Image: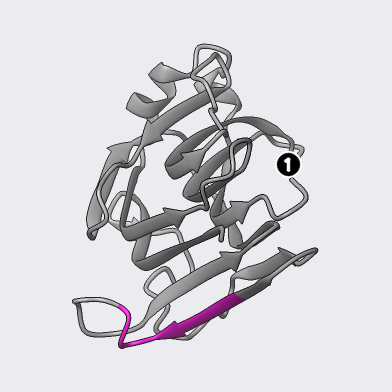
Amino acid sequence: MRKCFLILSVLTVLASGQELVLNGDFEDGLDFWATEANNNQGNYVIDYSPDYGPEPGNEVRVYKYMRYYAQINQVTLVPGVDVRFSASAKLLASKGSTSGYYSYAALILEYLDAQGSSLGRTLIIKKLGSYDPQNGPYLHVIPVTSNDWENYEFVLAEELENLSGISPTQVVGVKLIIESRGTGVSG
């Protein structure tokens, strides 16, 4: 059994006190968020409810059982990298005992240039199994070990110091991705 899910209560990107993420508290359901899923094996759920978390108001749940992924995402334009990112999330992942398989739940910040091309990523991830992303000039991995609600917060300019391959002056947007992924019975 390989399953993973992420529950998120609020996701914000603030610049000069202005919220840049549309419906980052999910009070309007999934408005302004794109949903994607590849459901080769197993099933997935993308929904929201006020009953998923400790705070009042809606939380979103992205759940994938077995192979491939389910996600929601939103592209947010930023007026430079001196903006604050914050999120409150609970990331869970489980897998069977078969070696070579994996599952993960992740909150991903994909940095975009003026053409909308990816420059690199920050990967806040709870993972189990064989998937082992490594830090590099275009990827910063923030491993999650907790099974509880956690708050994540940083200034993009400071986070980009972990990504030597990205020039902060090139970043004009961030694609925020909430994803559950795993392998299934056939890898």
Which residue is at a point 23% across and 54% down the rendered structure image?
Answer: 150
Query: At x 56% / y 56%, what residue is drawn?
Result: 179
Give the quarter of the image for residue 43: bottom right
Q: Residue at x 42, y 68 (%)?
A: 24
35 displayed left or right of 180: right
The magenta segment is: 45-52
Q: Is residue 15 left or right of residue 66?
A: left
Nearer to me, 19 or 69: 69
* Main secondary structure along the magenta-highlighted residues: strand
Q: Is residue 184 above or below residue 158?
A: below
Residue 95 to residue 42: above or below: above
Q: Work out which quarter of the rendered image holds the C terminus and state it.
A: top right
Q: Is residue 167 magenta?
A: no
Residue 17, position in %: x, y? Answer: 27, 55
Between 156 and 66, the one nearer to me in the picture = 66
Q: Residue furthest front?
A: 97
Instruction: Count numbered badges in the picture.
Output: 1
Residue 124 % position (x, y): 42, 41
Q: Is residue 172 above or below residue 160?
A: below
Q: x, y percentage for residue 81? A: 43, 33
Query: Which amino acid, mark 1?
Result: Gly
Answer left or right for 118 relative to 65.
Answer: right
Quadrant hosting residue 83: top left
47 falls in the magenta region: yes
| Residue at the spot of label 1 | 116
Question: Few, some or many C-alpha atoms within 10 Å of disc 1 (few <14, some 14-19, many ≥20)?
Answer: some
**145 lies left or right of 159:** left
Q: Secondary structure at mark 1?
A: loop
